[in-house]
Image (cartoon, rainbow, N blue to C red):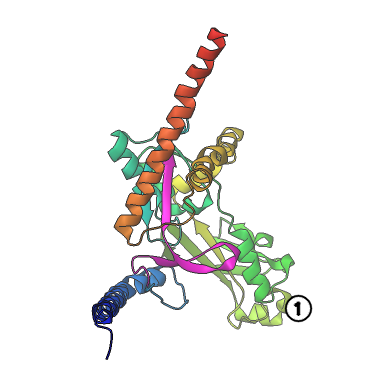
């Protein structure tokens, strides 16, 4: 005959298993609902990685971590006032990069302070044509590094077998005829143009017969059957002005201050508050956790910057 005391325990265990099954089913359904959004985001970024949703936290997104690992994550955005050293904007997004995070950060600052910043100092992840033009229209001074696309272009050319002597910089543009002259003296005539975002790309191409007869074809265009082509890009005026500004010593000196201002709150929150990973799940709860951590940081900085100097001065006077 069984112990009657084990029957309630068995019922509780069965109820717990049923509850666990229901919760797992809910997480699976929530993850399936997130898949179209994840797929759309990867399509916009032209990524070909596997579309995956997290079963532990459907709101999270699979992002790259340190040491080339991937895990469900959120993108925490913190805006810091350079003069006070306090956090004035906090946001949590599902974006895997910072390309579209600059304007939302400005909106959050405006909502909190009821004013927009006069200057934004950001790292390279925020710099793209759309953000540069958007801040120019808002009359906000943008400071940040100019992305260097030449390395990516050169790597692509090397992959296609093009020698460095025949990189685009070796071709001479002739404005009078709107054409290019190659190192071998042949003409690349204007072929057409296309719009890529805010950039207008003009394409020029040599005659196939000229390239076939050229002794430098193996070094210049070994894989091309239509003749060597060159693309000239014309960027938006705001982007051109931004690049010119970032060549000045004044702008570069301002940017040097970014690391100390922007990275200090992140380091403090990780080391002093201990928030190295979110303890909660779901975008809303994670956002609340981030807000509490940043509020704690601001209070601690207020104590450190305001109370401690006064207390130290009082001790000096008492001595």
Whole-percent x, y for residue 104 in the image: 34, 49
Q: Give the residue displayed 53% in from the left and 63% down from the top.
A: 65
Residue 90 appears in the figure: no
Q: Give the residue displayed 65% in from the left and 65% down from the top.
A: 154
- Residue 164 on the magenta segment: no
Q: Is residue 216 left or right of residue 95?
A: right
Q: Circle 1 sits on which residue?
A: 215
Q: Is residue 83 left or right of residue 217?
A: left
Q: Quadrant of residue 221?
A: bottom right
Q: Give the residue displayed 69% in from the left and 61% down from the top.
A: 170
Instruction: Specify the segment rendered in magenta.
Output: 56-80
- Residue 58 on the magenta segment: yes
Q: Nearer the viewer, residue 219 or 274?
A: 274
In the image as oriented, which residue stretches furthest toward the right? 215
Q: Quadrant of residue 285?
A: bottom left
- Dot 1 crowding, Cα within 10 Å, few <14, some 14–19, many 20+: few
Q: Quadrant of the N terminus?
A: bottom left
């Amino acid at each position: 005959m069984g112990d009657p005391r084990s029957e309630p325990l068995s019922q509780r265990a069965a109820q717990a298993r049923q509850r666990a099954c229901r919760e797992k089913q809910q997480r699976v359904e929530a993850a399936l609902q997130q898949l179209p959004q994840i797929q759309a985001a990867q399509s916009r970024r032209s990524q070909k990685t596997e579309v995956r949703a997290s079963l532990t936290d459907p709101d999270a997104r699979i992002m790259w971590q340190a040491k080339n690992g991937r895990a469900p994550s959120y993108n925490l955005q913190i805006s810091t006032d350079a003069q006070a050293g306090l956090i004035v904007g906090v946001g949590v997004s599902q974006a895997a990069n910072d390309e579209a995070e600059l304007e939302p950060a400005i909106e959050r600052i405006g909502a909190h302070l009821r004013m927009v910043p006069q200057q934004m100092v950001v790292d390279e992840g925020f710099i793209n044509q759309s953000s540069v033009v958007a801040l120019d229209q808002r009359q906000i001074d943008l400071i940040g590094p100019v992305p260097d696309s030449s390395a990516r272009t050169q790597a692509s050319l090397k992959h296609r077998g093009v020698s460095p002597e025949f990189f685009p910089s070796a071709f001479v543009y002739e404005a009078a005829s709107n054409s290019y002259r190659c190192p071998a003296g042949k003409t690349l005539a204007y072929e057409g143009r296309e719009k890529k975002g805010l950039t207008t790309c003009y394409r020029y191409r040599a005659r196939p017969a000229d390239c076939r007869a050229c002794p430098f074809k193996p070094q210049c265009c070994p894989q091309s059957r239509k003749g060597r082509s060159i693309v000239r890009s014309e960027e938006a005026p705001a982007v051109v002005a931004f690049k010119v500004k970032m060549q000045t010593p004044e702008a570069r000196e301002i940017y040097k201050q970014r690391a100390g201002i922007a990275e200090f709150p992140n380091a403090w929150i990780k080391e002093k508050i201990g928030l190295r990973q979110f303890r909660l799940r779901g975008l809303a709860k994670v956002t609340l956790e981030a807000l509490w951590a940043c509020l704690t940081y601001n209070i601690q900085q207020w104590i450190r910057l305001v109370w401690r100097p006064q207390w130290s001065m009082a001790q000096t006077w008492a001595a």
